[in-house]
Structure formats: structure tokens, C-alpha cells
Image (cartoon, rainbow, N blue to C red):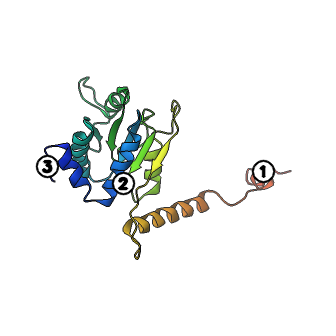
């Protein structure tokens, strides 16, 4: 992990990555009184980006991952819901770094209206569930899901292969879960209601 002492060094280091350059450009645009959840799987990357983004934007970014308590009997313990409340209470631009796995069922983050999947989860259902944290009752702003993808002019990049794989998994799930068309009489017959 490269430790930086100031925002300038942090910006320089993020510019060494095409994907992080895209993320900083997105964050600069989102900075207009809006909030963002930045999803990534790797804890080391979560810690590193927290450090760099804190320096660049003057924030104290919260990280929620498997190390963050889901519940606690102690009132002073910072649970996931308490950390999300602190994130949402801040009136201006803010960033929340989350693991898509830790962002499972039961969390609502309507204070954010942007999601950036910096590291895509291999399971499209987990990724969709993570994005759904901001698609909740109480969301007052338009919602934006960002999938920064690097491409190469001559070769298929890893991001392109992963996106193709995730889309094919979703199509497979949809073809198994929802048949193309079901007629009303087929439903009645299946339920034993046909006359």
C-alpha cells in the first residue's frame, strides 16, 4: 500500500490507473451535493482508496465490509446501520466505500444516488443486490449506476470479458426463472383451476 501525505500525491498515484482516473472524474461530477457508494471487493483497495479519497476530497470516508459489525448490543459500537446513518446525515458530497457482500439484505442507503462498481463481483445477483441499496422507498433523486470499464483498441480487456460473463449469467438466470410467455390457461391448469 502506498501511503501518501497530501492530496497532490494521492491524485498522482490514482492517475497511474485508468480505472481510478475514471472514478475521480465521476466523483468530481457527482460532487454537486450528491453522495456515492463505491463498491469494491478487495479490503486492501478499500483501505487505500479511503486514504487517497480522504486526502483528495477532504472527507472522512466510512468503509463497510466484512470487518464492520452488522449488529451489536453495545450502544457505542459502530454498526453498519449507524455508519450509514452518519454518512446520510452529512448534507453535502460524501463517499461510502462498501463491499458488495457486506451490502446484503437489510441495508438502505437512500442518501446516496450514485453507485460505482469499481471492482465487479463475479455474481451478478450480489452486484444487483448491492446496487439495490439505493433503489428504496425514500429515494428522492434520480439513481445512477456506474460501471467503469477499461477497453483496449486491439484486445478484449478483462473488464470486457467480465462484463460479457456477468451479462450471460443474467440472461441464463432470466431464461430459467422467467419463461418467454405463459398463457393464463396454462397457469390455471398448473394450479388445477381449469374447467
171 relative to 13 in the view: left or right: right
Say which of marks 2 and 1 sits in front: 2
Outermost residue toward the top in this view: 75
Spatial distance from mark 2 to mark 1, Cα to Cα?
Answer: 52 Å
Question: Residue 7 in the image: x percent, y percent?
Answer: 20, 43
Frontmost residue, 144 versus 105: 144
Q: Are marks 1 and 3 in contact (CB under 8 Å)?
A: no
Q: List the residue tagged with mark 1.
A: 188
Tell which circle, 2 or 1, labels the residue nearer the N-terminal end. 2
The residue identified by callout 2 is: 22
* Helix, strand or loop under label 2: helix
Percent coordinates x, y for residue 56 in the rendering: 25, 42
- Which residue corresponds to the image point at 30% horizontal and 41% vertical from the top-left? 64
Name the residue rendered at 33%, 44% in the picture. 98
Of helix, strand and loop, which one carries label 1? helix
C-alpha gap between disc 1 and disc 3 = 65 Å
Q: Earlier in the sequence, mark 3 or mark 2?
A: 3
Which quadrant would residue 162 be assigned to in this image?
Answer: bottom left
Q: What is the secondary structure assignment of the residue under circle 3?
A: loop
Q: Quadrant of residue 82?
A: top left
Pointer 3: residues within 10 angstroms few (<14), some, or many (20+)? few
Report the side of 96 relative to 141 (left or right): left
Seen in the picture, residue 1 relative to 133 is either above or below; the reply is below
Q: Residue at x 40, y 56 (%)?
A: 148
Indicate which label's residue lies in the foreground, 3 or 2.
Answer: 2
Disc 3: which residue: 3
Q: Nearer the viewer, mark 1 or mark 3?
A: 3
Q: Which sits in the foreground, 195 or 55?
A: 55
Give x and y (percent) for residue 71.
31, 32
Amino acid at each position: 500500500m502506498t501511503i501518501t501525505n497530501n492530496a497532490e500525491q494521492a491524485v498522482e498515484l490514482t492517475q497511474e490507473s485508468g480505472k481510478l482516473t475514471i472514478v475521480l472524474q465521476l466523483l468530481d461530477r457527482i460532487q454537486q451535493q450528491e453522495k456515492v457508494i463505491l463498491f469494491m471487493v478487495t479490503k486492501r483497495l478499500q483501505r487505500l482508496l479511503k486514504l487517497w479519497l480522504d486526502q483528495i476530497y477532504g472527507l472522512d470516508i466510512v468503509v463497510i465490509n466484512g470487518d464492520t459489525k452488522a449488529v451489536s448490543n453495545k450502544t457505542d459500537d459502530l454498526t453498519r446501520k449507524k455508519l450509514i446513518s452518519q454518512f446520510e446525515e452529512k448534507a453535502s458530497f460524501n463517499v461510502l466505500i462498501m463491499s458488495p457482500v457486506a451490502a446484503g439484505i437489510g441495508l438502505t442507503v437512500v442518501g446516496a444516488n450514485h453507485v460505482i462498481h469499481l471492482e465487479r463481483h463475479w455474481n451478478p445477483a450480489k452486484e444487483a443486490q448491492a446496487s439495490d441499496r439505493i433503489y428504496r422507498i425514500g429515494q428522492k433523486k434520480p439513481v445512477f449506476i456506474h460501471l467503469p470499464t477499461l477497453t483496449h483498441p486491439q484486445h478484449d480487456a478483462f473488464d470486457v470479458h467480465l462484463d460479457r460473463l456477468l451479462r450471460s449469467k443474467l440472461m441464463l438466470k432470466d431464461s430459467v426463472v422467467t419463461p418467454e410467455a405463459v398463457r393464463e390457461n396454462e397457469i390455471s391448469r398448473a394450479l388445477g383451476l381449469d374447467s
